[in-house]
Amino acid sequence: MIQVKNMTFSYNGQDEAIKNVSFSIEKGSFVSIVGHNGSGKSTMAKLLVGLLKPSSGTLAIDDLEYHDHNMIDIRKKVGIVFQNPDNQFVGVTVRHDIAFGLENQQLQPNMMEEKVLYYASLVGMERFLDKEPHQLSGGQKQRVAIASALAMEQEIIIFDEATSMLDPKGVKDMMETIMNIHKKFNKTIIMITHDLRQAGYADEMLIMKDGALIAKEKPAILFQDVTLLRSTQLLLPFELELYEKAKELNMSEKVIHALWAYNSKT
């Protein structure tokens, strides 16, 4: 679904924010891209959605290579939910915000209303359709942003740090929503995050560091390479820290394996 080859990007023409990165993402997969601040993960999200243009290399979505003449077709395939939902709330009410993209598609009013109701219900916001943005919590705004992206019925949805401004319950609810979307619609999901625990829900995890891609593998395999994970300067999940501490204290193999099994499940 996504093919990146030797892609480089610079904001100022000198310092490279993305350094010769290559990877592919299969259709219908759930991929997380992780890294510390400045690692290039959010720049990668903007490149994938077409908000930025690679300085060199190639980027293709569903066999469509990025060019100015086909950018509209590419953007029909890729949607994004940003870190701060206020930055993409364009309607005066929840109803208007979800309908905004549909109006640009020139749908009939009755079809538009059906889609608005359907996708609002899908994220639990059907009771808030007439609410204005200032009447919503951060988590509710993120749900509206997700509904707006889903209503466009794009094949790929990118979540760019979409849980970073939420409280623990909001994070849990958001992750459940993302997982349900992936399962229900078989969409290609890309989650940009600095939270390794959240990244572990994905089918595959890409690790960015200083603009370079340093690893691409299943989370269960990457979580066994603690040295690599520590090099990212990200916090290890509590369960993994506990597992590593058990090894340092020379606990019994039985206890260590039980902790690793628990970590793998969580």
Image: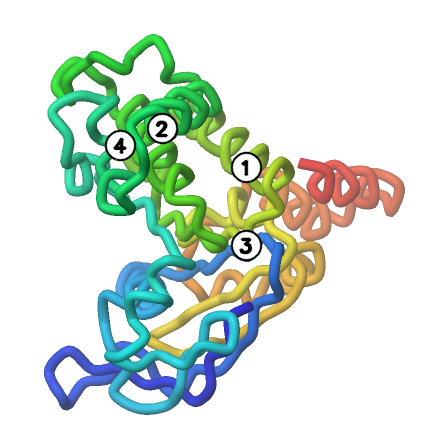
Q: Does 137 sit above or below residue 247?
A: above
Neighbour class for label 3 at 10 Å: few (<14), some, many (≥20)? many
> Which residue type does callout 2 highlight?
Arg
Q: Which residue in the structure is indicated by mark 3?
A: 188
Nearer to us: label 4 or label 2 = 4
Q: Which residue in the structure is indicated by mark 4?
A: 99
Q: Which residue in the structure is indicated by mark 1?
A: 181
The mark that comes first in sequence, 4 or 3, is 4
Neighbour class for label 1 at 10 Å: few (<14), some, many (≥20)? some
Q: Is mark 2 on a helix, strand or loop?
A: helix
Residue 83 in picture, x, y percent from top left: 27, 44
The mark that comes first in sequence, 2 or 3, is 2
Q: In this view, does 173 lie to the left or right of 143?
A: right
Q: Does 41 sit above or below residue 24?
A: above
The mark that comes first in sequence, 1 or 3, is 1
Q: Does 137 sit above or below residue 176?
A: above
